[in-house]
Amino acid sequence: MEQIITQAIIESYLKELIENTEVDVAICGAGPSGLLCGYYLAKQNIKVAIFEKHLKVGGGMPGGGIMFNKIIFQKEVLYILEELGISYKNYNEDLYVADSIETISALTYKAVKQNAKIFNLFSVEDVVIREKRICGVVLNWTAVEQAKLHVDPISVVSKYVVDATGHDCEIARIVERKLGWISIKGEQSMWAQKAEKVILENTKEVCDGLIVCGMAANAFFGSPRMGAIFGGMFMSGKKAAEIIIKNLEK
């Protein structure tokens, strides 16, 4: 029995990994914006793989604010919560409260059911480039990175790469450090109102093939962080998907 269990796990996982070594879009980071981007792309039958370096998905969302697992949304994004089947309660005329665990669970479930593939415990250590375009990611196990072992990575090729790695803006920093094609300004101190206003403007293709969304977008352009309010994060993920969909249709 133990051998069959082991064989089933290895065979099924390797099959999925092999099938996703070439995708339309490689999303780095399975936080709220990355998952929502993946959901909307997969909904349009675009082949998506999401790589998350941690054991869990959801980024900082499950922890809510100071480990109180409640998060805030604006009324402008309630239609997305309703599409995903997420419950919410009105707090005042502008703000709504949702359960962070329910929210990330529903978003993850919906993304997976649309056939977005999520691979956790993978870290991105480099990008694939061809003729000054980002066209994939170089991956290794997170455990290898943490242990500082000399183990060669693998690569996944894609038409677009999405940096949804949050505050650290990890993929864009690789491009900045190794290629010098871009310059990252860095995340500023918390100012929720301003951060929520500029995050959509900041969500864009910053060099050929690389799109930033979520907190990575605000970090890239030197905008503030916003704390446990997630309307902008959701809209940013959706906008990143729309940019890619439009470009793939050309």
Image: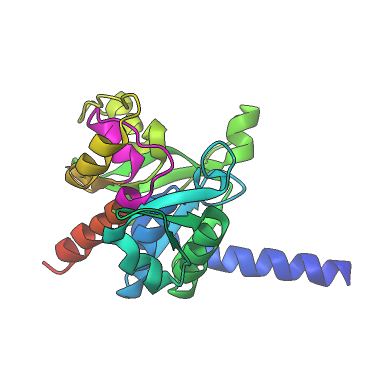
Note whether 120 is above or below 225 in the view shown: below
Q: Is residue 155 visible?
A: yes
Residue span colored magenta: 214-233
Residue 226 lies within the magenta run: yes
Image coordinates for residue 99, horizontal then vertical, percent: 53, 57
Classify the position of the N terminus by image quarter.
Answer: bottom right
Q: From the viewer's perspective, is 9 left or right of 20? A: right
How is this picture coloured? Answer: rainbow
Q: Is residue 22 visible?
A: no
Q: Residue at x 84, y 67 (%)?
A: 3
Q: Residue at x 65, y 29 (%)?
A: 147
Q: From the viewer's perspective, is 69 left or right of 167? A: right
Q: Residue at x 51, y 66 (%)?
A: 106
Instruction: Give the farthest residue toward the right.
Output: 1
Note whether 74 is above or below 163 in the view shown: below
Looking at this view, is 13 or 117 the one in front?
A: 117
The mark total stands at 0
Q: Quadrant of residue 140?
A: top right
Image coordinates for residue 218, horizontal then vertical, percent: 28, 36
Q: From the viewer's perspective, is 152 left or right of 164? A: right
Image coordinates for residue 25, horizontal then vertical, percent: 33, 58
Residue 34 lies within the magenta run: no
Image coordinates for residue 90, horizontal then vertical, percent: 40, 59
